[in-house]
Amino acid sequence: MRKGYFITIEGIDGSGKSTQAKLLHQYLQEQGYRALLTREPGGTDLAEEIRRVILTPGKEELDPMAEILLYAASRAQHVNGLIRPALESGAIVISERFIHSSLAYQGYGLGRDLDLILEINRLAIGDLRPDLTFLLDATPETSGERVRSRSQVNGNGYDRIEMRGLSFQERVRAGFLRLAEEDRRILVIKTAGKSIEAVFEELKEIVNRSLNNFK
Ligand code: TYD
């Protein structure tokens, strides 16, 4: 391989990203690839600290601009500390969420300027972009069910972003779909009514095709 390959998995909260990311990671390792699984916000110790600051609900509202900058700060830490070195060593990197989450959540969800978010991210991580992005598309109602049951199981309630409710999630979902319309590197997989295995079959087929072209 000339250099690594960067895959990101996006979607609204509860869309099943983690499950698919784990399955893909395992599959690629079984195929003999060196694959690294990571997530945002987070991925390194310091970036995970920033994650905690962003997501833990507190008395004080998180300022939207501070939010954009904190996600970008955690991304800079993540990219420079983990993702870029892994790609340079030829690994396949799978990240649950990346820059498209900032565009969908802070851009379309919170109504902040997309160009500004792109510019801030360019300062944070330069021109690194995923080679392939999956958008797992589900309705906020279906995903909300998963988030609700998960937060009950965890017993720690909703995080700050999940507390923003259904109409916020609807804006984020529409934003993701819009981003996918404008960028052919983003592939949409509809998850409604499909089993985990069926979704993974679709995802796997696309990854196999992309890696064949890439080699
Ligand atoms: P995540 O851990 O993926 O949550 P979930 O498993 O519930 O999908 O992400 C945590 C939250 O961070 C999620 O609500 C989306 C939000 N987020 C942003 O708003 N902007 C960003 O740039 C990123 C990376 C995440």
Image (tube, rainbow, N blue to C red):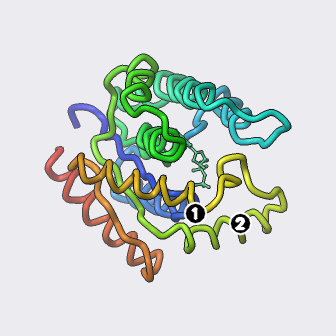
Could one spot residue 95 in this view of the protein?
Answer: no
Tag 1: Cα neighbours inside 10 Å, few (<14), some, or many (≥20)?
many
> Can you give x and y, in whole percent of width and height, for residue 91 in the image?
36, 38
Report the disc number at residue 150: 2
**Label 2 beta carbon less than 8 Å to ligand 1:** yes
Which residue reaches farthest left?
A: 213
Residue 195 shown left or right of residue 42 in the figure: left
Q: Who is closer to the viewer here, 95 or 123?
A: 123
> Can you give x and y, in whole percent of width and height, for residue 205 in the image?
26, 66
Mark 2 belongs to which amino acid? Arg
Disc 2 + disc 1, Cβ < 8 Å:
yes
Up-down: is 152 above or below 110? below
Q: Which residue, given by chain and number where applicable, does mark 1 sit on?
A: 14
Up-down: is 57 above or below 66? below
> Can you give x and y, in whole percent of width and height, for residue 184 in the image?
21, 50
Give the secondary structure at mark 2: helix
**Label 1 beta carbon less than 8 Å to ligand 1:** yes
